[in-house]
Image: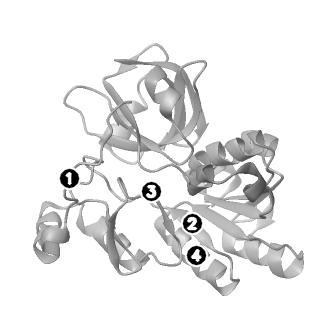
Amino acid sequence: MYKIINKKLLAQSIYFMDIEAPRVAKSAKPGQFVVVKNTEKGERIPLTIADYDPQKGSVSIVFQTVGKSTKELAQFNEGDCVCDFVGPLGCPSELVNKTPDELKKKNIIFIAGGVGAAPVYPQVKWLNGIGVKCDVIIGSRTKDLLIMQDEMAEVAGNLYISTDDGSFGFNGRVTDCLTDLVKNKGKKYDHAIVIGPMIMMKFTASLTKELNIPTTVSLNPIMVDATGMCGACRVSVGGEVKFACVDGPEFDGHLVNYDEAMRRQAMYKTEEGRALLKYEEGNTHSHKGCGCGGEK
């Protein structure tokens, strides 16, 4: 059992929790995720790691209540325990494999849409910890749905807020904000990391391709077992079959087939759709062999 040591409501239907999980906290790296089960027979919920503290032995998660299991999790309070907390899963951010000197030579921008601010934060915090400052755009539909702007402001070089309705910060989408920074403010970027809803990543990656900015996206398709066996998170990247849970979640943003990924997400929600995908995709439907390291 894993105790909830802190819980906060960040915005409407968006919650923050600190979970006591020392072994996960000790092994976690920016860009990875965990799988949470509320009860023994509950659904497996994949959630990106929003922060981790090896000294305190805690891992932070941020989630939006969109279905039964996340709404159930939102009813848990400080002192309550979730049944399972498995991780860290997935590949760490590609940035952790580079030296501080390499990273200091690059102008990096992170672009977060909605709840995507949560997985962006640990990467920006890690970079700040090794002396690398980067720009960050956080976007949401309206001011009331913005999250983690104060925490991000402490670790980012420059923080830009963008709201679709203009209720706070830049008036427009994150793509409009990036266009303004590059074309009107004279900003130059060597790399972009984009995390948010699939449709937002699709259009942002299209823009960065036009601007000639190499781009990494962190995919968040439906996952069931989070070990590559179920085939739910199958994606096409550069014409090759990949699985977000074991090969990702990060991929080259200019090579992802977003339309296919969004079509699969919609189909996978029904039993008939899952059966059709398995039939159409044959032996490429699921990963051969388990890539799960379990709780290290």
Dot 1: element: loop
Image x and y of residue 133, in percent: 81, 51
The residue tagged 2 is 216
Q: Which residue is mark 3?
A: 249
Q: Nearer the viewer, mark 4 or mark 1?
A: 1
Q: Secondary structure at mark 2?
A: strand
Q: Which amino acid, mark 1?
A: Gly
x and y percentages locating residue 282 in the rendered image:
12, 72
First in residue order: circle 2 vs circle 1: 2
Q: Which residue is at 18% across, 62% downward?
A: 270
Q: Earlier in the sequence, mark 3 or mark 2?
A: 2
Q: Residue at x 59, y 45 (%)?
A: 118
Q: Secondary structure at mark 3?
A: loop
User: Which residue is at 73% across, 71% downward?
Assistant: 190
CA distance separating discs 4 and 1: 31 Å
* Amino acid type, mark 2: Thr
Decide: is 208 above or below 244: below
Label 4 residue SS: helix
Q: Nearer the viewer, mark 2 or mark 1?
A: 1
Crowd rating for badge 4 (residues with CA inside 10 Å; few <14, some 14–19, many 20+)? many
Question: Which is more N-terminal, label 1 or label 3?
Answer: 3
Disc 3 and disc 1 in contact, CB within 8 angstroms: no
Return the mark for residue 289. 1
Q: Nearer the viewer, residue 97 or 128?
A: 97
In the rendered structure, which amino acid carries the disc numbered 4?
Ala
Place of residue 12 in the rendered image (x, y in percent of width and height, measured from the top left): 56, 43
**Mark 2 vs mark 4: in front:** 2
The answer to which of marks 2 and 4 sits earlier in the sequence is: 4
Nearest to the observer: residue 92 or residue 109: 92
Q: Tell me if residue 244 can be seen.
A: yes
